[in-house]
Amino acid sequence: MALETCFRAWALQAPQAAASGLGGGGRDRLLLGGGGNNALPSRLRLSVASPSPVAPLRPASSRFACQCKNAVDEVVVADDKNWESMVLGSEAPVLVEFWAPWCGPCRMIAPVIDELAKEYVGKIKCCKVNTDDSPNIATTYGIRSIPTVLMFKNGEKKESVIGAVPKTTLSTIIDKYVGSS
């Protein structure tokens, strides 16, 4: 979804770049797939059509920055609205970090969760729940300290870890549930 948002932003920015003389004179266009009998989902059928060679684009302004880096393996925000479908209804094991923006140890463990999401892409889902924004979820699972990381499989809480722990600790927990029934 972040990748699609970035492409949409690019499509909006491209006419401005063409008007200012940056790029291929407005001949570049982004084609987002849809329809047809392609095997790929529509969000993956992307192509950039350019009828002529294009000069390298210079940044039009610092206002526009693509946030789609590692969009495929990002940690997703879970909240009261999507908790059921994202965590409890997931077929894959789900690693959920409970955090808050003001929590120092939460900021320490965030890069670890991001790395795990990249390493286990396609094997698990990684989610973050802001306890300030979704206190009901935190209360339901007895979260009293943050950061707390819970592991869910088949909609059930399997394990919990409290505090900013090393990556190896979380990897060991994930490995227990990846590939097991």
Image: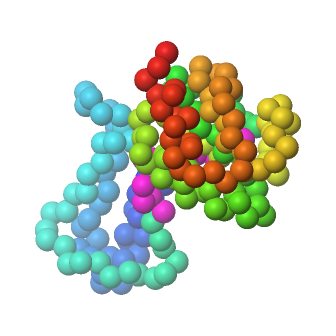
- Whole-percent x, y for residue 100 in the image: 76, 56
Residue appearing at x 82%, y 51% in the figure:
132
| Nearer to the camera, 82 or 74 | 74
- Whole-percent x, y for residue 156 in the image: 67, 22
Could one spot residue 32 in this view of the protein? yes
Part of the protein shown in magenta: 67-79
| Rendering quarter of residue 107 | bottom right
Residue appearing at x 49%, y 81% in the figure:
62
Image vertical order of residue 6 relative to residue 46, above or below: below
Image vertical order of residue 28 relative to residue 161, above or below: below
- Whole-percent x, y for residue 147 in the image: 72, 50
Please, which colouring scheme is shown?
rainbow
Residue appearing at x 32%, y 56% in the figure:
30
| Nearer to the camera, 93 or 16 | 93
| Rendering quarter of residue 164 | bottom right
Could one spot residue 8 in this view of the protein? no
Asked if the magenta segment contains residue 134, the reply would be: no
